Image (cartoon, rainbow, N blue to C red):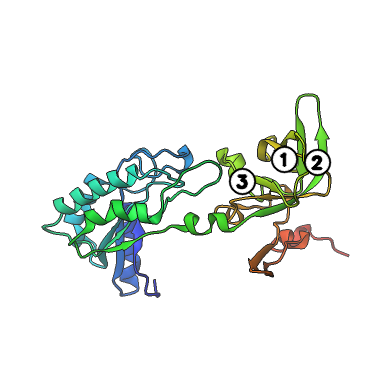
Amino acid sequence: MNEDILLFNVESEEELEKINLLAKRLKRKARVALRLNPDIQVDTHSYIKTAKEETKFGIPLSQAYSILERRKSFPNLEIKGLHVHLGSQITSLEPYRQAMEKLVKFMDDTHDFFIPSYLDLGGGMGIIYGNEEPFTPDDLSRVIAPYLENRGITLILEPGRFIVGNAGILVTQVLYVKRCEKKNFLIVDAGMNDLIRPALYGAYHEIWPLKEEKRGEGEVYDVVGPVCETGDFLGKERKFTGIKEGDYLAVMGAGAYGFSMASNYNSRPRPAEVLVEDNKFFLIRRRETYHDLILLEAIPPHLQETG
């Protein structure tokens, strides 16, 4: 609160009350935006739909209207904007069009007593993981711009996945090639703790060998990790030709919701992060060690060995 934060995107009236109290203690005015829940359906995984009324996110429009009418009851706040986030990995423009329709109506309905300075439309722009056909920023601007003409409002977007999703890969080595009667497996040294999206969302990531494949029909494999879960997979029913132990694979599209969602599950140290620029590379986060895993642990004095 001592920093000059542009806006706190507020999820509920209870959160408004808490920020108002903290601002009072600091003898400051805090700028906030109301995160609205416009009750809009998006075609994405159910875990990352964030704008339906049954989700935990945002303030229903009727309640937001009431808050704005009573905004003077939060004397230490400046309500400066509105915020909406529809979800993640959205590949259709229609939800954004519907959101703008509802937002414009809401702004018109409250115009007599509230004029927002900022409109934050969140993120959600999808990328290509497999055969998706996502829209471009130009496409999105053509949908949004007509609704905001002559409103004098600053637009904020949060296109994180769109920027970094396909800028990152996960490199993993084949530990074993396991052939069974009903299915073949490539057991690799990366697992669900390194990239949880396939296990958590059933997400698809392209998986490419790092060396040119031999010619031939190839074989179909599940690419799985060493974690003690049947859900520990990076890809299912992928075809490779001439793959063998020691080969390296690149799991594509791992730049977003990859390392940030990684964990030490199964006591597995997290991998290194390497930045590649042209023909140079830089280690930007070292590989964890087993010592790192216990670094923050402590044994109560009465359980420590004595004498």
Question: What residue is shown at x 30% (from left), y 62% (from top)?
Answer: 155
Q: Which residue is mark 3?
A: 196
Looking at the rendered image, the quarter that the C terminus falls into is bottom right
| Front-lying residue, 249 or 257 | 249
Would you say 131 lies left or right of 185 here? left
The amino acid on which the numbered mark 3 sits, given as a three-letter code, is Ile
Give the CA distance from mark 2 to mark 1.
18 Å
Report the quarter where the N terminus lies.
bottom left
Query: Quick check: 13 above or below 186?
Result: below
**Could you say which is closer to the camera, residue 70 or residue 174?**
174
Which residue sits at x=43%, y=45%?
Answer: 90
Q: Tell me the number on the disc at residue 224.
A: 1
Q: Secondary structure at mark 2?
A: loop
Look at the image and tell me whether residue 299 can be seen.
no
Q: Nearer the viewer, mark 2 or mark 1?
A: 2
Q: Is residue 45 toward the left or the right of residue 177 in the image? A: left
Q: Where residue 176 sits in the image (x, y, percent)? A: 83, 42
Residue 205, image x and y in percent?
A: 60, 44
